Amino acid sequence: MTRKETVMPWKEKTLMSLREEFVGLAVQDEANLSDLCRRFKISRKTGYKWLKRFRQGGTGALQDRSRCPHSSPGRVSAEMEGEVLEMRAAHPAWGGRKIKARLETLGKPTPASPNTVTAILRRHHEIDPDEARKHQPFQRFEMPQPNELWQMDFKGYFPMLLGGYCHPFTVLEDHSRFLLGLQACPDETYHTVQKQLTDIFRRYGLPQRILMDNGSPWGDTTEVPFTILGAWLIRLDIQISHSRPRHPQTMGKDERLHRTLQSELLNQVPLPDLPSCQRAFDQWRYEYNFERPHEALGMLPPATRYQPSLRPFPEYLPPVCYEPGEIVRKVGMSGKISFHNRIFRVGKAFRHQPVAIRPAMVDGDFDVYFCKQQVAQISLREHNP
């Protein structure tokens, strides 16, 4: 018989069979217990434990024993467990921390630790481990005061039961995570966004700055990122910023909001048409702003940290004015200006509008401003585009 044939296939043997074999050898008259423990790769203490159990109860005593304590004075009551499961049923996407915080806000009995709430959910198969591992937080940054920065974007559109598509438009306040707008839109055009923003501005005032991505209707190209919508916002004295191309984490809060909207509403409720979408959006937005605990806010809802802006929305656009003595040019139909007998592209978003040309840090370079925002840079050291 070869050595390969005499080697015991340890990995194929069950733990119970190894224990039975060990004690079977250990009870022999000439057994060397230390040597057996070494061969079975267990400590002498463990070997004596299994031998003692075998002598007291035979092979049945070699089964693993329950490690549960005989009494559990801190065990969660049936009432607490019921409250946890009821809250989970109402909010299937909420985890242990949110459920515990919301139950405390409502004055209901709750376990002492969020981990206990999570354990209850796991015990009742309310948490999918594979799905839970996908939920990794974005890196967070935060503006110090409300309305210093808003983020806006369209969440990916989805088909409705009765036909057509809904394009959810979201506007999020950075400091408080207050959801200023969640609108069910039929498209993603400039006119649709302008109408929705006008309603939001009338209710909450104007922000200092708005962050948006580079897609339509707020982005054009990386070279000329401004659109008609952007020009309108600049006229309202709102600074606009664009996220880095192919870096969605720049708008991490809005991206995270979209994941939450998907898991807590869109995955739960079938929506037949735009009016139904808007009713569901309005209800969920109220819950998100005033009831739902937010982990980044110390488990408080966003409304506890938000105040409307003190900058009112003007019903009429203010005129475009510059300081006396500044170099001003009018943008032509093609989005270009003439300067020092050369033609420079500024952007079609500003056609028929005056822009100011100001010297930059380098000789021969100039910054082009529309109202208070720099929209281009030109150089007399370069050839015409």
Image (cartoon, rainbow, N blue to C red):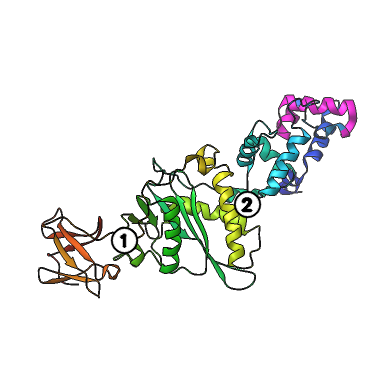
Q: Which residue matches tag 2?
A: 131
Q: Is residue 7 visible?
A: no
Q: Residue at x 34, y 50 (%)?
A: 208
- The residue type indicated by label 1 comes to Leu
Q: Residues within 10 Å of mark 1 (few under 14, many from 20)?
A: few
Q: Quadrant of the C terminus?
A: bottom left
Q: How many marks?
A: 2
* Magenta span contains residue 215: no
Q: Are marks 2 and 1 in contact (CB under 8 Å)?
A: no
Most extreme residue toward the right, as rendered?
57
Q: Residue at x 64, y 32 (%)?
A: 113
Q: Is residue 286 left or right of residue 170?
A: right
Identify the element where label 1 is drawn. loop
Most extreme residue toward the bottom, as rendered?
333
Identify the element where label 2 is drawn. helix
- The residue type indicated by label 2 comes to Glu
Residue 153: where, in percent of width, then height?
45, 59
* Magenta span contains residue 45: yes
Q: Residues within 10 Å of mark 2 (few under 14, many from 20)?
A: few
Residue 29: where, in percent of width, then height?
86, 25
Hey, which quadrant is residue 334 in on the image?
Answer: bottom left
Magenta residues, as a range? Answer: 35-60
Marker disc for residue 317 = 1
